[in-house]
Amino acid sequence: MKVSRLLHTRYRVDDLDRSVRFYRDVLGLEEVRRHKSPRGSELVFLKALESESTIELCSFPASGPVQVQTDLTHLAFEVESLVGFAAHLASLGLAYSDGPHYRPDGSGGFAFIDAPEGYEIELIQRSPAASTFNQTY
């Protein structure tokens, strides 16, 4: 038997409200549900508008502060334009932490921003002509 699909990915955070604001206001994710787990974790599920999978943000202060190791993990999201997204970030007083980097053939590019706890967020711009771009990055 095999699994059928990815449902969600959990990221533990120190400040749930600050992280929800970041994922909602900066990335444009939609909050789909919020509840408390049986062990006391505060959970918020968010999703990108065209995705089925969700991100679960978890606040569980009893486990201590979150310490994200460099290059441990990241989330990747598609954007229409890295230039346009950079303008959106600038309007919020933010900037890319790395990039943007474009492919030499013009078929797309990528850049990174950091979420509040230090989780990396990759933004990928795909060109309509680049049918294999997502597999390349």
Image: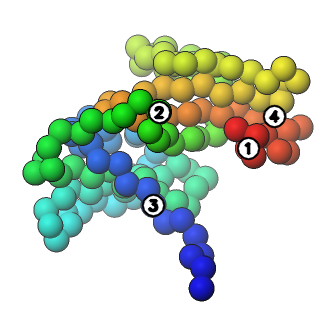
Q: Amino acid at mark 4?
A: Ser
Q: Amino acid at mark 1?
A: Asn
Dividing the image into 4 quarters, which one contains the N terminus?
Answer: bottom right
Q: Which residue bears the numbered disc 2?
A: 71
Q: Nearer the viewer, mark 2 or mark 4?
A: 2
Which element carries disc 2, helix, strand or loop? loop
Residue at 21 percent across and 49 percent down: it is: 59
Which element carries disc 3, helix, strand or loop? strand
Q: Which residue bears the numbered disc 3?
A: 8
Q: Nearer the viewer, mark 1 or mark 2?
A: 2
Q: Judge whether 75 appears above or below 87 on screen.
A: below
Q: Which residue bears the numbered disc 1?
A: 134
Q: Nearer the viewer, mark 1 or mark 4?
A: 1
The numbered mark, 1 or 4, whose residue comes first in the sequence reads 4
Q: Amino acid at mark 3?
A: His
Q: Nearer the viewer, mark 2 or mark 3?
A: 2
The numbered mark, 2 or 3, whose residue comes first in the sequence reads 3
- The answer for how far apart the CA atoms under marks 2 and 3 are is 20 Å
Q: Judge whether 73 appears above or below 55 on screen.
A: above
Which element carries disc 1, helix, strand or loop? helix
- The answer for how far apart the CA atoms under marks 1 and 2 are is 19 Å
Counting from the top left corner in percent of width and height, residue 2 is at 60, 79
Q: Which residue bears the numbered disc 4?
A: 127
Does residue 118 appear left or right of residue 91 in this picture?
left
Q: Amino acid at mark 2?
A: Asp
